[in-house]
Image (spheres, grey):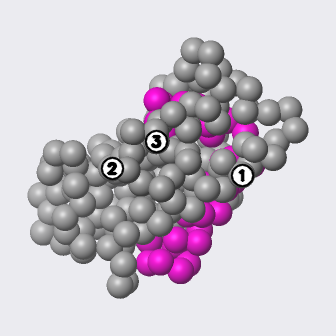
């Protein structure tokens, strides 16, 4: 992966996108979405993850975030992806009328698709939910920060899931609109995230 998408600075905030393999729409059921939200809560409470904005879409997760503690942001995201992958596979396997039989890519069922996604890897792994890497871009200015925050919050509107950003339950747009939400985030005011930004 190109260095331009790598997380290199521990103290910095990043615009991060985690995407499912093949852009499979796995996050369409409440239990799958809540697994992601609860896993993010765990990372906030136990691993030093600070989230300024997020939006969980059917096939990807956008965040503006940084690490605050002993772990790097790369470490936190690696652990998050490992944990959620295992637990999503468990949920899919145990579902009665199941996402196992959906057709995300031609004739392959979901489990078969996620199994084939890791067949070429040299790791001891049976399924692969997330694409490698984190598609991370350093937040280098206030203008870039607000551009990405607006982009994140408008993602469900652009995808015709809701009319207004704050109507989408799995987004920090609700936090910024001072509405109840499943996940608490660090809401930014008009004050810069980091001083001396242009």
- Secondary-structure class at tag 1: helix
Q: Quadrant of residue 11?
A: bottom left
Q: Quadrant of the N terminus?
A: top left
Q: Where residue 151 sits in the image (x, y, percent)?
A: 38, 39
Identify the residue position indicated by label 2 in the image.
133
| Mark in front: 2 vs 1 | 1
Separation of disc 1 and disc 3 at Cα? 17 Å
Image point (30%, 46%), residue name: 135
Which residue in the rendered view is the most extreme toward the right?
Answer: 96
Report the disc number at residue 90.
1
Instruction: Please name the residue shown 52% across and 25% down the image.
Output: 159
The numbered disc on residue 118 is 3
- Sequence-first disc among 2 and 3: 3
Query: Which secondary structure dominates the residues rendered in magenta?
Result: helix
On whether residue 21 falls in the magenta region, the answer is yes
Q: Residues within 10 Å of mark 3 (few under 14, many from 20)?
A: some
Residue 88 x %, y %: 65, 50
Span shown in magenta: 20-49
Magenta-drawn stretch contains 191: no
Q: Earlier in the sequence, mark 2 or mark 1?
A: 1
Identify which residue, 106 or 197, lies in the foreground: 106
Q: Distance of mark 2 from mark 1, alpha carbons?
A: 23 Å
81 horizontally vs 102: left or right: left
Q: Residue at x 57, y 52 (%)?
A: 85
Question: Extreme bottom residue here?
Answer: 70
């Amino acid at each position: 992966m190109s260095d331009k998408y790598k997380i290199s600075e521990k103290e910095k905030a990043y615009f991060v996108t985690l995407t499912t393999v093949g852009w499979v729409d796995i996050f369409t059921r409440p239990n799958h979405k809540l697994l992601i939200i609860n896993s993010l809560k765990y990372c906030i409470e136990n691993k030093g993850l600070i989230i300024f904005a997020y939006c969980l879409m059917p096939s990807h997760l956008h965040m503006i975030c940084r690490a605050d503690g002993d772990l790097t942001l790369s470490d936190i995201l690696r652990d998050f992806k490992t944990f959620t992958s295992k637990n999503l596979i468990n949920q899919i396997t145990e579902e009665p009328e199941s996402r196992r039989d959906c057709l995300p890519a031609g004739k392959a069922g979901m489990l078969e698709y996620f199994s084939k996604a890791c067949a070429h890897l040299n790791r001891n792994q049976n399924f692969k939910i997330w694409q490698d890497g984190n598609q991370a871009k350093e937040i280098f200015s206030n203008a870039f920060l607000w551009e990405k925050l607006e982009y994140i919050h408008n993602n469900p509107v652009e995808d015709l899931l809701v009319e207004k950003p704050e109507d989408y339950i799995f987004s920090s747009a609700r936090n910024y609109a001072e509405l109840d939400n499943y996940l608490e985030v660090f809401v930014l005011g008009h004050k810069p995230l980091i001083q001396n930004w242009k």
